[in-house]
Image: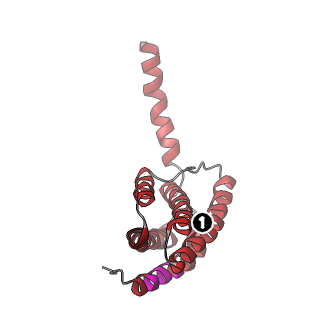
Amino acid sequence: MKRLLATLVLVFPFAAFGADSIPDSAFYKNAAEGGISEVELGNLATKKSNSESVKDFGAMMVKDHTAANSKLKDVAASKNISLPTSASMGQMATKAKLEILSGDTFDKSYIKGMIKDHEEDIAMFKKEAASGKDPDAKAFAVATLPTLRAHLKKIKSIATTAGVSLD
């Protein structure tokens, strides 16, 4: 037992160091989880929304974020970086909440969530583009930012039409 504990004490610091030594590992993880969540929520919107504009937006989320997720996977694979295969716990909780909503309540909650998500995504991608250490992660962030900005502009327009407050 003492030998096992001694081995664990010696091995875990190196395992933790290895994970942290990947430049921009948090960006890779957060971008992957966010992309997965956007696809899942987009699929939900296409099925549950009463609004054609929200359904269309959801379909755009599925299409655009599936493409971005694929590009991110390719970049990560070229560097032997393992990406998450599911959304974060918080994102899963958001999905679970949306799954029980319906009608206008679903639409308003989805719209507000998409505005918040895309504002946060844009901030994260701008930070990566400006100060990331991994040139491939920076290039991915730069290439993806225009799409994220277009999504935010579109969902804000939908919010205005639907009477959803942008505050």
| Quadrant in the picture for the C terminus | bottom left
Residue 94 appears in which quarter of the rendering? bottom left
Above or below 72: residue 58: below
Magenta-span inclusion, residue 154: yes
- Is 127 in front, or is 39? 39
**x%, y% of residue 3?**
46, 14
Nearer to me, 113 or 18: 113
The answer to whether residue 5 is above or below residue 108 is above
Q: Position of residue 98 (x, y in %)?
A: 43, 61
Above or below residue 122? Residue 74 is: above
Residue depicted at x 46% and y 69%: 121
Q: Position of residue 74 (x, y in %)?
A: 68, 59
Residue identifier under label 1 = 135
**Helix, strand or loop: magenta stretch:** helix
Q: How is the image coloured?
A: secondary structure
Residue ID at (51%, 45%): 19
Mark 1, other Cα within 10 Å: few <14 / some 14–19 / many ≥20: some
Query: Which quadrant does the N terminus fall into?
Result: top left
- Region in magenta: 150-158
Label 1 SS = helix
Q: Residue at x 40, y 62 (%)?
A: 101
The answer to whether residue 133 of the structure is visible from this angle is no
Count of marks overlaid on the render: 1
Task: Please name the amino acid that badge 1 sits on.
Answer: Pro
Q: What is the residue that sits farthest to the left in this orientation?
A: 167
Residue sitting nearer the eye, 53 or 10: 53
